[in-house]
Amino acid sequence: RGLDGEITALSSKVQALQQSCRQMEAELKELNSSMTTPEIAGEIEDLRKDCASYTEKLERIKSATNHVTPEEKEKVCSEQKLYCREWRRRKRMATELLEAILEGYPKSKKQFFEEVGIETDEDHNVTLPAAV
């Protein structure tokens, strides 16, 4: 009985030590996978160089004299609105015309488009810009 008690105590001690060993192995694995001090220093230096180059690029952009004027921007925006409006109008006219043709056409819309060679915006995943 005394030996059985001793075996039980030692077994629980072995389990506790094995658990501790697993925790230490996990911690060791984590530490081995992390960066070393020289690696971190190199990474910091690389990031500082990147930061300096981005700062220089930003200064060049800020000091550039060829900015777009508000008038040019407004002109481009108004042209875009005009072209989008025209796109919508022409698409609507084409759709109405095709619907009128398809009323008397015996086959499906898809078959008609294939026979005639019509490609739609949807075939090319093109969508009209949102109306502003």
Image (tube, rainbow, N blue to C red):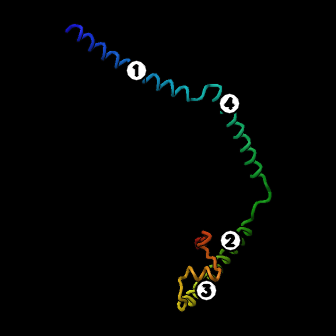
Dot placed on the residue nearer the N-terminal end, 1 or 3: 1
Q: Which mark is residue 77?
A: 2
Q: Which mark is residue 20?
A: 1
- Left or right relative to 17: residue 121: right
Give the structural element (helix, strand or loop) at label 4.
helix
Task: Tell me the residue at 60%/69% (across/down).
Answer: 125
According to the image, label 3 marks what residue?
93
- Gap in angstroms between the C-alphas marked 2 and 3: 24 Å
* Residue 58 position within the rendered picture, expressed as x and y whole percent measured from the top left: 73, 48
Q: Locate the N terminus by quadrant.
A: top left
Query: Helix or strand or loop: what does disc 2 sit on?
Result: helix
Between 3 and 75, the one lying in front of the other is: 3
Amino acid type of the residue that numbered disc 4 sits on in the rendered structure: Gly
Looking at the image, is mark 1 or mark 3 nearer the viewer?
A: 1
| Quarter of the view holding residue 12 | top left
Describe the element under mark 3 as helix, strand or loop: helix
**Place of residue 52 in the rendered image (x, y in percent of width and height, measured from the top left):** 72, 40
Label 2 vs label 4: CA separation? 47 Å
Return the residue nearer the eye: 98 or 111.
111
- Distance (Cα) linking label 3 and label 4: 63 Å
Q: Are marks 2 and 4 in contact (CB under 8 Å)?
A: no
Whichever of callouts 1 and 4 sits on the residue coming sooner in the sequence is: 1
* Precedes in sequence: disc 3 or disc 4: 4
Is disc 1 in contact with disc 4, using a CB cutoff of under 8 Å? no
Label 2 – label 1 distance at C-alpha = 68 Å
The three-letter code of the residue at mark 1 reads: Ser
